[in-house]
Image (cartoon, rainbow, N blue to C red):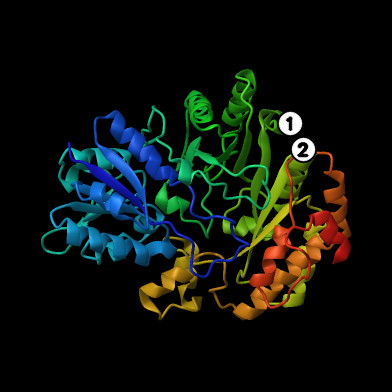
Amino acid sequence: MRKISLIDCERTPSNRSDHYYSVSDTEPLGLLYLEAFLRERGVECEVFKSPLDHRDWRSIDRSEVVGISGLTYSWLAMKQVAREVRCRLPGSVIVCGREHASCAAEEVLAESAFDAVISGAGEVALWKIAQGAPWSDVPGAVWCDGAGAIKSTPRLEGAPPVATGQLQRRKPWMRNMLTESMTIHTEMAGLVLSRGCPYRCTFCTAPQMWGGYWGGDVEATIREIKVTQAKHGTRYFAFHDLMLNANAPRLNLLASRIIEEGIDAHFYGMMSAINRGLDLKLLREAGLIEVGVGLEVPDDRRRKIGKGSGFGEAQAFVQGLADAGIFVRGLFILGWPWDTNLQEIRERYRGALEHLPINALRLHFLTPFPGTEVWREHFDRFIYRDAGEAAYERLTTMEPVLDFGLSPQDLCELRHDILCDYYGSAHFARLAEGQRDWPRVEMTGAYVGNLRGSFSKAIAVPAHASLTELATRT
């Protein structure tokens, strides 16, 4: 079996806004699952995080296969790492994976340092490569033949196989990426209960990356939680599922099993704003304390972008979370083709938000990721379309990059105004006051305080002022 090194090139974007995440350099969870799968089958495999130091290179230099992973904005970093690996290991096999590679395979292969792209799930593909299989026998492989023609093999049909053993977590990587809301935890461990998503949202790479939805093993998840707690003492877990509530019976079962096992932990997960059989009070009893909800659009136009419910159902779902005692992180997207009138947008958000019990309001910008419908239909509106590959660094959702009539400055100030209007509203003050006696999970003033370094308008409050205090001062 060939030795495999897997390198995560995820990094903090150069144009980072603290409004996005407090910490972005967290566990490379997908690679850890790949590592566990391969080790179970006798493959020597190890995961590394860029930037690499001399100790990392000592191990990588013994590899015969190197897999490089990262999101679109990390593409230049991925290329740089691939070139260095090629220089040090000219005879090695170098492959590229994750969303960008799966959605832009031909462009990735234009970089000569890469031998192939692995699209979609990588477990079986890497296992085949470790055994020395030709590309034609590697599921999901995309490569160039001797004549320079692009070739590919179909992905595996159905649910991809996953590791049954435990992940080899690294303590330094177990950082809480949501520290501004979950201040009682400094560490976080990632979990995955499912892969893919049943919806095909116009702005999302999931349809191209996964091509479907598959549920996971509840008992394997329970074992992973218990082992991680026993080994690392972790009490905060984040589900990395794209839509944790896609299979309500499975999630309800997981909650019941957590309670039965007496597991003392807090959990976070992303959900679509739809409730088809979820027992939200059961989930809260099991330790689900915060949910990120993909709201995207504050009216029924959310159906036009592939969401599975109208805004009324989304509003009812968010209210149900709050009624169950679960904090809500509400995520919206600004900069749609219909977002052309600043005053109308402000009024639309003001009218919608005063009926939503959102603790953490997150406003991102519509971003044309390769492989998405937004990329195909609106690339001509991409402000940096003539900047070549350097433009990929702008694809973070943290800055406006599409021009539908409003300038980037207009959109940034709009985001600032919506946030200030919401956090300074009587509605939010009542919400914060009503949750004062909830279990000790602190919400801090960082949601608004971090705006000071991001936008031209500033709010002069102490960095650690409580949101209740802020609401009375604004």
In the picture, measured across the screen, residue 155 lies left or right of residue 169, that is left
Q: Residue at x 39, y 27 (%)?
A: 164
Query: From the viewer's perspective, is residue 116 above or below residue 42?
Result: below
Q: Secondary structure at mark 2?
A: loop
Kind of residue at badge 2: Gly
Q: Secondary structure at mark 1?
A: helix
Residue 456 placement (x, y as % from top left)? 69, 78
Residue placed furthest toward the front: 54
Residue 182 placement (x, y as % from top left)? 67, 46
Q: Nearer the viewer, mark 2 or mark 1?
A: 2
Q: Residue at x 21, y 47 (%)?
A: 65
Residue 37 placement (x, y as % from top left)? 33, 34
Query: From the viewer's perspective, is residue 119 above or below residue 236?
Result: below
Kind of residue at badge 1: Lys
In the picture, measured across the screen, residue 214 lies left or right of residue 161, that is right
Read off the residue under disc 2: 325
Read off the residue under disc 1: 281
State which tag comes first along the sequence, 2 or 1.
1
Q: Quadrant of the N terminus?
A: top left
CB under 8 Å between discs 2 and 1: yes
Whole-Å distance between the Cαs marked 2 and 1?
8 Å
In the picture, measured across the screen, residue 437 lies left or right of residue 226, that is right
Specify whether residue 117 is in view. no
Q: Residues within 10 Å of mark 2 (few under 14, many from 20)?
A: many
**In the rendered image, which quarter is residue 72 located in?**
bottom left
Viewer-closest of 106 and 40: 40
